[in-house]
Image (cartoon, helix red, strand yellow):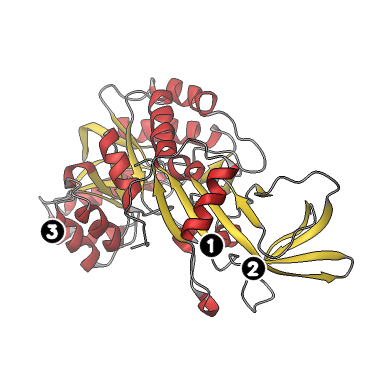
Amino acid sequence: MLPNDDGEMQLPTPCGNGVLAGLVQRFGSPLFVLDCEVIRRQYRSLASALPGVELHYALKPLPQPAVIDTLASEGSCFDLATTGEVELVRQAGIPPSRCIHTHPIKRDQDIQAAIDFGVKTFVADNPDEIRKFAGYAGRVALLLRVSFRSPAAVVDLSRKFGCDPEAAPGLVELAMSLGLEVIGLSFHEGSQSRLPDTKLRAIESCAAIIRATQGRGMTTPATLDIGGGFPIDYIEPAVPVEEFCAPIRRALAAIPEGTRVVAEPGRFICGPAGTVLTTVMGRAWREGRWWYYLDDGLYGSFSGQLYDHARYPIEPLREADGPRFHSVLAGPTCDSIDVIAEDIELPELQAGDILVGRQMGAYTVASATDFNFFPRARILAVNR
């Protein structure tokens, strides 16, 4: 479990630079500030953009107790993928009826742990995986994951998981032959999708599969899990969520009547809620540029630059007039790969200056390490 400050702290949203500077003075650096009011705002905006869709927060990008508690109070459901995530929601007191388990490839011990908790809905995408559930007939319900490759997604999640659409009816028949209940389909075209086009194509294709298999192994009404991928702003702005979801709403209006629709938002919920504060440890003039060495880097909160292909808005916390210079931001470790930005325009900084990274809630502290024994950022949840 990620570390967390348990104190209650109400701060303005967004936090001004003076407030952030005070937090670093009080709690130290590096510091990850998690604003739960932003979590609420993001959840409500997506719920408004997708009325009638059951939102299951995907824990993977930020498996933090404060996020779970905040979303539970909003009425959110949860998308689990590992035994560790099952344990996290169990500790948070989340009813298993509000959870689904969506990792397409599982060990038997993972299946058993989720069933013991009370989860009933699981995802599978191939014959071997379906056969793993044969001993649990009557205790589980399956969603078949279908693959739809997306050139518009920054991270293509259909590359690794999902069956071809043409294979889905045969998998339904296999499950039926094993006494297993198939309640619907799922897909996830990719993360940080720039456009909804692939999701629209996937909804249409899945609707056709549901129509073809209902009465032949697929339950009526069926469930359709439309995944996540809802984009957020980073350095470049994303399509506003209402505009992104408008064609999705129209596509969902054409699916078989009574179909239960769920989604798995992760980044959209938690990404804008995270702010990272990191301090300049030292500097060096090298090859005509200032190199600034920070106490956080690619092995820490900026790990998403490697794993998630994200680039975060970064600025000095101290406002400075005057010229800016081409600069390099490097992390604290002794590894030469640990460079956050190769050419960023900054005012001249000194050791002790603080930089702030915004939109850093997703795939940052969740994938951070303590490589080289540099400690991970402390997590401070505010506005709980």
Question: Is residue 357 at least partly visible in the picture?
Answer: yes
Residue at the location (13% across, 59% down)?
Answer: 116
In the picture shown, does residue 299 fall above or below 95? Answer: below
Residue 253 falls in which quadrant of the image? top left
Q: Is residue 86 above or below residue 285?
A: above
Q: Are marks 1 and 3 in contact (CB under 8 Å)?
A: no
Element on which disc 2 rests: loop
Q: Residue at x 75, y 58 (%)?
A: 349
Residue count near mark 3 (Cα–Cα under 10 Å), binned few <14, some 14–19, many ≥20? few
N-term mark: 1 or 3: 1
Front tag of 2 and 3: 2
> Can you identify the residue that label 2 sits on?
331
Q: Nearer the viewer, mark 2 or mark 1?
A: 1
Q: Dot 3 lies on which element?
A: helix
Q: Residue at x 47, y 40 (%)?
A: 268
Q: Amino acid at mark 3?
A: Asp
Query: Which amino acid, by three-letter code, is at mark 2?
Result: Gly
Contact? badges 2 and 1 (CB < 8 Å):
no
| Residue bearing the label numbered 1 | 29
Mark 2 or mark 3: whose residue is earlier in sequence = 3
In terms of image quadrants, where is residue 85? bottom left
Marks 1, 3: nearer the viewer:
1
Q: CA distance from mark 2 to mark 1?
A: 13 Å
- The image shows residue 381 at horizontal and vertical percentages of 39, 49
Q: At which x and y percent is residue 382?
A: 40, 45
Q: Secondary structure at mark 1?
A: loop
Q: Is residue 275 left or right of residue 204?
A: right
The residue wearing badge 3 is: 116
Is residue 324 or residue 181 the one in the foreground? 324
Residue 181 pos. (x, y %)? 18, 45
When the figure is inspected, residue 173 is found, relative to residue 254, above or below; the finding is: below
